[in-house]
C-alpha cells in the first residue's frame, strides 16, 4: 500500500466515526480528529483497532497518545508498516 | 400536585410482530410468534422453541446510525430502540434538536440482563488476554441502563433517564414509575417500557430449572398454553414494548391521540415469606398489590371488566386466577374477561409487562379483547373459579372500560397497573 492508498484507507476508517453533521470531505491530512472533526474521544480506541486490522500492525498506548491529526496517524502507520516489512 | 396521566404513544417489537400493525394483526388472528430454534437444538436444550422478534438489517438501518450499528451485538438494545423510537413517533413527538434536550421528557426503560451476546464476546477476548481489543462499545451495550441511555441519546430526553429491573415484573413496574413521576409534576412525559435479550444465554438458566416445555419441539405454536390443563411450562420469549405516558394537560395541548388513561398502579413484594419464595409469589402480596392498585386508581372491584394476566402457562396459573377471583370477589360469570397474550408471544420475561400493556391498550383503541390460544382444555380448577365464557378463545368485539394488568417476577415481586378508557368529555 503506497502512501496515497494509506491515506485513502485511513480516511475510510475515520469516516465511520464522524458525527452526522461533519461531511467526509472535511477530512484532510491536517485535520485534528477530536477538535476539528469532532470525533467522540471514546471512539479513538475504535479507530486504533480498525487501523490495526487494516494495516496488520499493533499500536501501543504511547502511539495513541501521539495521534492528534490524520497526518500523525499516517506517520505512525508508515513507520510500523516499514518496520514490519524489514 | 396530582396530574392525570394518559398514554399517547405505543411501540412494540414482539415475537409475533414488529410494529403496531403487525403485532395487532397477529394478536387479532391468534398467530403465534413461537418458533423452533435450531440454535437451541444444536445446544441440546430440552426446550427448543422460543419467541424471538424478526428484525432485518434493513429495518435496523432506519433506527441506528452506521456507527451505532458497528459492533452492535445486544439484541435487547435493538428491540428496545425499535419499540421506544416507534412509541415516540406514534405519540407525534419529535427528536430534540442537536443542541438542547427536552428537559420535561424522561425515560424509565427496564431490562433483565442486557447485551449477553456482547458480554460473551468481551469475556472471550478478556480470557484470551486481549482486553485491549474490546473497543469502546462493550460497556454501553452491557450496562443495565444501556437501553435507556441509547433511547435518551436518540430522542434527546433531558429528564430522569433510568432502567428499572424487577425480573418479569419490570415492564409493568416501569409504567407505574413513569406514571408516578408525571403525577407529581416532575416530568410532562415519560417513555416507559422494557426489553429482553434473546438467545441461549438468556433462556438456558430456565431450561436448566426444567420449567420450560420440552414436548412441543415439533409443534412450537402449541407450546405456550396459559390456563390450560395441558400447560407444561412457559415458552421463553424476548422483545420490547414501549409506551409514551404524558400529563393529560400536555396531551390535550398537543392535540395528541389518547389510547387510555393510566388511573393508578401498585408495586410490592411478598418478601419471600409465607407462600412466597425466590421463584413463587406470596399470595397475600399478590392480592395486596391488586387491591393497592385499585385503591390508587380509585376504582371499585366491580368496575374492572378486562384483565390481562401474568399467566405464563405453568401450574401457577390456577393460583393466579384464584388470586384475581378472591381479590375482586368475582366468580363464575361475574369474573372479568381475561386473557393471556403469552399463548401467542411466549413469555417475553422482562419485556413481557410492557408488551402486554401495549396489547391491552390496543384493545381500547380497536375495541376488542384478544382471544386466548392453546388454553383448550381449560384447567378444571380454573373453570371452578371463572366461567369459560370469560376466557375468549377467539378475539371478540368489546369496548374495555377498566383494564387491570398485572405482572409477577422472580424475587417475589409484583406490579399491577389500571388503565381506563378515555373519553373526550373526561377533559379537565
Image (tube, rainbow, N blue to C red):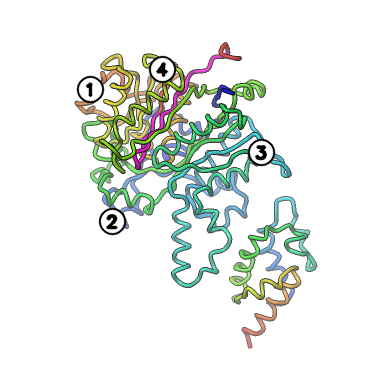
Upstream in sequence: badge 2 or badge 3: 2
Q: Residue at x 59, y 14 (%)?
A: B427
Say which of B122 and B295 sits in front: B295
N-term-proximal mark, 2 vs 1:
2
The reply to whether callout 3 and callout 1 are in contact (CB within 8 Å) is: no
Q: How many C-alpha atoms fall within 10 Å of the one at disc 2: few (<14), some, or many (≥20)?
A: few
Residue B284 position within the rendered picture, expressed as x and y whole percent measured from the top left: 30, 29
Q: Which circle marks residue B397 in the picture?
A: 4
Provide the secondary structure element on which disc 2 rests: loop
Relative to A64, B349 lies left or right? left
Of callouts 3 and 4, the N-terminal one: 3
- The CA distance from mark 2 to mark 3 is 45 Å
Residue B258 locus on image (x, y percent)? 56, 22
| Residue A69 lies in quadrant | bottom right
Q: Residue at x 80, y 67 (%)?
A: A30
Instruction: Tell me if mark 4 has few (under 14), some (14-19) or many (20+) residues whose alpha carbon lies within 10 angstroms of its own.
Output: few
Q: Which residues are magenta?
A: B406-424
In percent of width and height, residue B345 lies at 38, 37
Q: Mark 3 or mark 4, which is nearer to you?
A: 3
Quadrant containing the N terminus of chain B in the rendered view: top right
State the residue in front, B281 or B364: B281
Q: Which mark is residue B95?
A: 3
Q: Residues within 10 Å of mark 3 (few under 14, many from 20)?
A: some
* Discs 3 and 1 carry the same chain letter: yes
Name the residue at 67% across, 37% down. B102
Query: Would you name the residue on which mark 2 appears?
Result: B44
Left or right, B227 with respect to B79, comes to: left
Q: Is residue B341 magenta?
A: no
User: Residue A4: x and y, percent?
Assistant: 74, 73
Labels 2 and 1 share a subunit: yes
Disc 2 versus disc 1: nearer the observer: 1
Compute the Cα span from label 3 to label 4.
36 Å
Amino acid at each position: 500500500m503506497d502512501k496515497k492508498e494509506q491515506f485513502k484507507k485511513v480516511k475510510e476508517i475515520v469516516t465511520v466515526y464522524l458525527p452526522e453533521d461533519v461531511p467526509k470531505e472535511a477530512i484532510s491530512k491536517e485535520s485534528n480528529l477530536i477538535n476539528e472533526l469532532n470525533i467522540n474521544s471514546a471512539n479513538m480506541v475504535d479507530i486504533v483497532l480498525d487501523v490495526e486490522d487494516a494495516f496488520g500492525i499493533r499500536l501501543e498506548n504511547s502511539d495513541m497518545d501521539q495521534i492528534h491529526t490524520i497526518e500523525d496517524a499516517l506517520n505512525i502507520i508508515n513507520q510500523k508498516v516499514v518496520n514490519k516489512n524489514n | 400536585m396530582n396530574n392525570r396521566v394518559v398514554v399517547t404513544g405505543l411501540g412494540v417489537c414482539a415475537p409475533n410482530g414488529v410494529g403496531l400493525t403487525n403485532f395487532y394483526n397477529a394478536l387479532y388472528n391468534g398467530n403465534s410468534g413461537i418458533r423452533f430454534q435450531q440454535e437451541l437444538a444444536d445446544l441440546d436444550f430440552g426446550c427448543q422453541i422460543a419467541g424471538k422478534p424478526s428484525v432485518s438489517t434493513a429495518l435496523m438501518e432506519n433506527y441506528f446510525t452506521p456507527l451505532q450499528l458497528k459492533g452492535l451485538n445486544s439484541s435487547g438494545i435493538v428491540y428496545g430502540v425499535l419499540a421506544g423510537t416507534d412509541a415516540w413517533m406514534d405519540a407525534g413527538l419529535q427528536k430534540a434538536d442537536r443542541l438542547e434536550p427536552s428537559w420535561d421528557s424522561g425515560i424509565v426503560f427496564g431490562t433483565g440482563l442486557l447485551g449477553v451476546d456482547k458480554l460473551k464476546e468481551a469475556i472471550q477476548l478478556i480470557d484470551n488476554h486481549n482486553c485491549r481489543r474490546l473497543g469502546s462499545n462493550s460497556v454501553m451495550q452491557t450496562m443495565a441502563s444501556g437501553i435507556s441511555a441509547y433511547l435518551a441519546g436518540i430522542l434527546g430526553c433531558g429528564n430522569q433517564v433510568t432502567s428499572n429491573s424487577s425480573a418479569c415484573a419490570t415492564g409493568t413496574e416501569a409504567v407505574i414509575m413513569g406514571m408516578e413521576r408525571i403525577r407529581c409534576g416532575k416530568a410532562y412525559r415519560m417513555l416507559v417500557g422494557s426489553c429482553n435479550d434473546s438467545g441461549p444465554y438468556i433462556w438456558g438458566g430456565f431450561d436448566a430449572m426444567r420449567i420450560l416445555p420440552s414436548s412441543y419441539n415439533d409443534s412450537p405454536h402449541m407450546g405456550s398454553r396459559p390456563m390450560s390443563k395441558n400447560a407444561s411450562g412457559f415458552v421463553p420469549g424476548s422483545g420490547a414494548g414501549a409506551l409514551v405516558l404524558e400529563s393529560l394537560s400536555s396531551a390535550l395541548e398537543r392535540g395528541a391521540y389518547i389510547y387510555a388513561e393510566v388511573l393508578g398502579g401498585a408495586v410490592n413484594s411478598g418478601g419471600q415469606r409465607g407462600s412466597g419464595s425466590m421463584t413463587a409469589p406470596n399470595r397475600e402480596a399478590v392480592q395486596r398489590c391488586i387491591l393497592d392498585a385499585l385503591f390508587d386508581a380509585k376504582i371499585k372491584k366491580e368496575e374492572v371488566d378486562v384483565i390481562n394476566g401474568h399467566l405464563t402457562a405453568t401450574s401457577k396459573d390456577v393460583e393466579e386466577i384464584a388470586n384475581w377471583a378472591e381479590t375482586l370477589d368475582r366468580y363464575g360469570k361475574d369474573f372479568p374477561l381475561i386473557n393471556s397474550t403469552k399463548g401467542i408471544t411466549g413469555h417475553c420475561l422482562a419485556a413481557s409487562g410492557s408488551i402486554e400493556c401495549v396489547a391491552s391498550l390496543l384493545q381500547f383503541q380497536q375495541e376488542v379483547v384478544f382471544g386466548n390460544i392453546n388454553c383448550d382444555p381449560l384447567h378444571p380448577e380454573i373453570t371452578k373459579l371463572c366461567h369459560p365464557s370469560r376466557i375468549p378463545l377467539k378475539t371478540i368485539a368489546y369496548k374495555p372500560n377498566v383494564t387491570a394488568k398485572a405482572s409477577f417476577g422472580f424475587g417475589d415481586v409484583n406490579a399491577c397497573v389500571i388503565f381506563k378508557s378515555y373519553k373526550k368529555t373526561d377533559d379537565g
